[in-house]
Amino acid sequence: MINSKDWLTCLRFEDKDGRFHGSSVAPLFEAAPFFFNSYEEYAEAARAEASHYVYWRGTNPTVRIVESMLAELEGGEDCRCFASGMAAIHAALMCCLTTGDHAVLVGHVYETSVHLIQYLNKFQISYTQVEGTSVEQVERAIRNQTRAILLESPTSLTFELVDLKAVAEMARSSGIRTIVDNSWATPIFQKPLSYGVDIVVHSVSKYLGGHNDLVGGAVIASSDIMERIFYEEYLLLGAAMGPFEAWLLIRGLRTLPLRMNAHHEAGMKVAEYLSGHPSVAAVHHPGLISHPQYDLGRRQLSGYGGLFSFVLKESSYEAVCKVINRLKRFRIGVSWGAMESQVISPNIGTNEQQLKEQGIPLSLIRLAVGHEPPNWLIEDLEQALQN
Ligand SMILES: *Cc1c(COP(=O)(O)O)cnc(C)c1O
């Protein structure tokens, strides 16, 4: 399930010419500016900042190490790491869009990404959000001014899939860029660039970091796109990842294949348990045969993350509170992708009308299955779901 090339990338950082004295662990360069021996040397670096160490808002050796690891894992030519997933998504969108352009958002993409595109409306950038389960739906939303399609597969609340290859082909033939947020699958289970997608973005705060101890983002694409992003969105907007976050991320990546395997196994067990429970109306997990796009998932993904959702039969905020408050093993909080299992619901008591409009069930509960023994989690759910 996990290919050996990915393992090699996760286990080794490049120590070109023994610069790091054979160190087993990547060095942490907590340095803002870099000094030069002559003015000519500095001038050469300043003329090509993308490939020289001048200042960490642009390049830093520790950050560069993790960028090359992520580029390799995603099968892209280059990567830049950002201060957050949102900064990465912002850079990717701004690289594709200008005043008057239109973007298509597919399905229930990450809510803050929707808010970001709404904010860009002040630059007359408009958008259409469509259900993404068929390519025709996406195609129908395209206008003359459409320049970017932003999607997640699966989405991280309702876990619908998008046929990445079909959407990428359709978009490319119309000169539209595709941006895929691959935070859920990680490159271990899905490599969107191999399906013809132009830009992959990540919140590395989730599985890639894997320990709830860092916030960061990444953009991976061709050298051409990445060079433009570097000199414009990266250097100008200034949301660079810091070296310590990069160092933590390198550490997280070393166990990524192991962790993803464990999330896959444990997530499947918990999802299967819930899908037979009398208090549960539905389980949204692309690995269940009952998932309407199960076959697409089998083709497109080589494994499943441990984040999925289920819907209670009793449909109210009170029912959501009751079940979540009874859970003892699952911690209540945003984000996901670390050691500890987490639980959350999009229903915060005052947004029921909004959820209805978005087609999100009022009693949807999202679980992030972590690394506790799955039977602990199942026992915990069993007691929480009792009437
Ligand atoms: C968390 C998340 C983001 C935003 O990432 P931050 O690192 O929190 O800025 C984007 N997309 C998805 C799918 C996420 O789960």
Image (cartoon, rainbow, N blue to C red):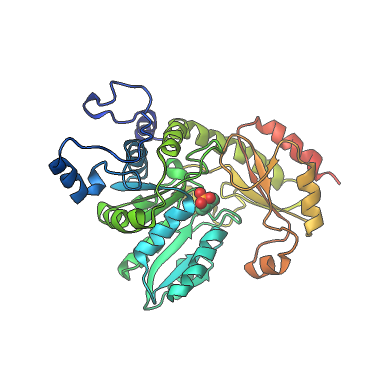
User: As drawn, is 172 to the left or to the right of 211?
Assistant: left
Q: What residue do we see at 37% from left, 76% from top?
A: 145
In depth, the one of 275 and 212 nearer the eye is: 212
Task: Decide if residue 196 is in sight here.
Answer: no
At x 51%, y 37%, the residue is: 260
In percent of width and height, residue 356 lies at 69, 68
Residue in the foreground of this view, choosing between 325 and 357 = 325
Q: Residue at x 32, y 47 (%)?
A: 58
- The single residue placed furthest to the right in the displayed view is 387
**Residue beneath the point at 45% across and 54% down:** 87
Q: Position of residue 384 (x, y in %)?
A: 79, 42
Q: Is residue 333 left or right of residue 119?
A: right
In the image, taking residue 230 as reference, residue 354 lies left or right, namely right
Toward the left, the furthest residue is 40
Pick the front one: 189 or 244: 244
Camera-nearest residue between 123 and 313:
123
- Residue 96 found in image quarter: bottom left
Give how far across and how far down residue 73 sits, in percent.
36, 41
* Quarter of the N terminus within the rendering: top left
Q: Is residue 17 visible?
A: yes
Q: Position of residue 119 (x, y in %)?
A: 50, 68
Counting the numbered discs, the total is 0
Q: Quadrant of residue 313?
A: bottom right
